[in-house]
Amino acid sequence: MATGYFEIILVRKFVTSGVVAKDSEVLEDTAATISCVVNGLTKQLDAVTWEKPNSGGVITHGTALDDYQIAVWTYDPDHNSQTTVLTIPVSANGADAVYTCVIQSDEHGKTSGAEEKTNVNSNVFSEYLTNINFTRMFRSLILLLVKALEP
């Protein structure tokens, strides 16, 4: 009499999350677009907000031309990611600033009160070549090259 042998293998897909900041560099007195791409998701984020520089408070989405605009894209199951985009109006984009992307994902333990915060740079330059602007452009070029060489 033969006995059957069944082996059950359970495979659990473990996905680690990570937030990638997408900085911008634009001419002064123009609108800028910055974003956060959240990778390693298996479902839609629970909440996404943006904060103004220097703890200036939460940004709200506006409808007027001179308001901040926030776009939260839907979860992309093909890439296990979700993107949020902040458009900074001309009136708020006169100098370099660091905005904060705030992500809440209960799936990854980033619950209310313990959200993940990522700084995103909005760099502004002038059309006039000064030592400061030249330094900023050189720094941006170096950062771009470093990012391009990352695995």
Image (spheres, rainbow, N blue to C red):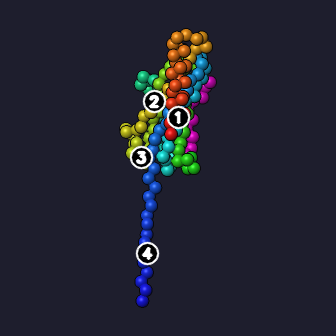
Disc 1 crowd rating (10 Å Cα; few below 14, some 14-19, many 20+) is few
Q: Position of residue 85 (x, y in %)?
A: 55, 33
Which residue shows up at 43% across the image and 81% down it?
4
Q: In the image, is residue 80 above or below residue 126?
A: below
Q: Secondary structure at mark 3?
A: helix
Q: N-terminal of the two: label 4 or label 2?
A: 4
Q: Position of residue 77 (x, y in %)?
A: 55, 50
Residue under label 4, please give it.
6
Q: Which amino acid type corresponds to the residue marked 2 in the rendered image?
A: Asn
Q: N-terminal of the two: label 1 or label 4?
A: 4
| Foreground: disc 4 or disc 3 | 4
Find residue 74 and report its image quarter: top right
Residue under label 2, please give it.
119
Asked whether disc 4 touches disc 3, contact meaning CB atoms under 8 Å apart, the reply is no
Question: Over which residues does the magenta segment extend?
Answer: 63-75
Q: N-terminal of the two: label 1 or label 3?
A: 3
